[in-house]
């Protein structure tokens, strides 16, 4: 299930829950993103026996997830129904699914809670650091994905506005475009990574004279990544550090891109890539 983000993109909650189960060892996982003022609707289940939790709206501060969201930090309980540290508005649903030990981790982007992820067991066990750390790592991946999507959509919006003709505005767009392409490689969900790179492609196409003819220039994704770094003035060494590559590999990608573009210098390659709609 892909859930719409506030910026119009989407994130795959199901993939995040699969990673949470695999990394934490918890057989049950569920969660969702913010659906309205003060509420987080559970939109995806993994490992459950019924659909009783699906669609449940979690109010800010209520229950385990609501408390995690309100305090913007993870919480875990050994026995949900008897825990004295949470309110019990959702006991019936939790009992119907037969859950006992539960943890909840908020998904926080720019200091705002955007959702909650849960992991659970059907018997009372004090959840250790491994489970909590794994759940937090998955939440951090989801936060980064949401942040990158938001930024990609923001840049697309900027590129479509009349103010984008300002060279200073385009310089910001170009620098951010390069950063987004580099960061996209760290996204664990391959479908989401492709979606983010597609947004970068639309951003580049929106700025080209012919509104994007990148299909006529068969550059490999990593060649575009290298050109995006070079366009910001980065040396091969800096580009290598940003992209997680060796300087020799960056140099090889750059040579290949220059050959495909029919140019003989780094500057010419950047200019040609922009004309072709490969770079903004």
Image (tube, helix red, strand yellow):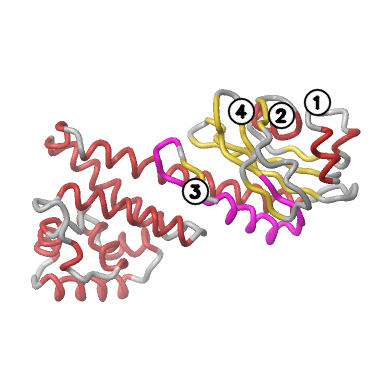
Furthest toward the front, the residue is 51
Under circle 2, the secondary element is: helix
Question: Residue 243 falls in which quadrant of the image?
Answer: bottom left
The disc at residue 11 is: 3
Residue count near mark 1 (Cα–Cα under 10 Å), binned few <14, some 14–19, many ≥20 = some
Q: Is residue 159 above or below residue 248?
A: above
Q: Nearer the viewer, residue 229 or 122?
A: 122
Magenta stretch in the rendered image: 6-30
Q: Nearer the viewer, residue 13 or 223?
A: 13
Q: Is residue 108 above or below residue 84?
A: below
Residue under circle 4?
Answer: 39
Distance from label 3 to label 2 (Cα)?
23 Å
Residue under circle 1?
Answer: 87
Dots 2, 1 in contact, CB < 8 A:
yes
Distance from label 4 to label 3 (Cα)?
18 Å
Looking at the picture, how far across and down is residue 128, in whole percent?
80, 50
Closer to the chain start, of discs 3 and 2, is: 3
Question: Residue 194 falls in which quadrant of the image?
Answer: bottom left
Closer to the chain start, of discs 1 and 3, is: 3
Dots 4, 1 in contact, CB < 8 A:
no
Looking at the picture, how far across and down is residue 103, in whole percent?
75, 43
Distance from label 2 to label 4 (Cα)?
12 Å
Looking at the picture, how far across and down is residue 46, in whole percent?
69, 53
The disc at residue 140 is: none
Dots 3, 2 in contact, CB < 8 A:
no
Residue count near mark 2 (Cα–Cα under 10 Å), binned few <14, some 14–19, many ≥20 = many
Closer to the chain start, of discs 4 and 1, is: 4
Under circle 4, the secondary element is: strand
Distance from label 4 to label 1 (Cα)?
16 Å
Q: Residue at x 67, y 53 (%)?
A: 134
Q: Residue at x 26, y 47 (%)?
A: 175
Q: Is residue 67 magenta?
A: no
């Amino acid at each position: 299930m892909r859930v719409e983000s506030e910026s119009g993109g989407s994130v795959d909650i199901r993939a995040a829950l699969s990673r949470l189960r695999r990394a934490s060892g918890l057989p049950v996982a569920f969660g969702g993103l913010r659906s309205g003022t003060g509420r987080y609707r559970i939109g995806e289940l993994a490992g459950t026996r019924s659909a009783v939790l699906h669609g449940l709206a979690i109010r800010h501060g209520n229950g385990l997830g609501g408390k995690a969201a309100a305090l913007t930090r993870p919480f875990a309980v050994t026995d949900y129904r008897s825990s004295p540290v949470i309110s019990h508005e959702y006991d019936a649903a939790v009992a119907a699914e037969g859950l006992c030990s539960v943890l909840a981790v908020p998904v926080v982007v720019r200091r705002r809670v955007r959702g909650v992820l849960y992991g659970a067991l059907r018997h009372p066990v004090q959840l250790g650091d491994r489970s909590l750390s794994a759940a937090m790592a998955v939440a951090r991946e989801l936060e980064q994905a949401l942040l990158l999507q938001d930024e990609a959509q923001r840049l697309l919006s900027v590129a479509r506005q009349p103010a984008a003709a300002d060279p200073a505005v385009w310089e910001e767009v170009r620098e951010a475009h390069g950063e987004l392409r580099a960061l996209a490689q760290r996204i664990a969900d391959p479908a989401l990574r492709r979606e983010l790179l597609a947004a970068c492609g639309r951003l580049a196409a929106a700025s080209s004279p012919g509104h994007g003819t990148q299909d006529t220039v068969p550059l490999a994704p990593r060649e575009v990544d290298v050109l995006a770094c070079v366009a910001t003035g980065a040396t091969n060494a800096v580009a290598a550090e940003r992209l997680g590559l060796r300087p020799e590999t960056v140099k090889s990608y750059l040579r290949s891109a220059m050959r495909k573009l029919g140019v003989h210098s780094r500057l010419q390659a950047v200019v040609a890539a922009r004309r072709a709609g490969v770079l903004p």
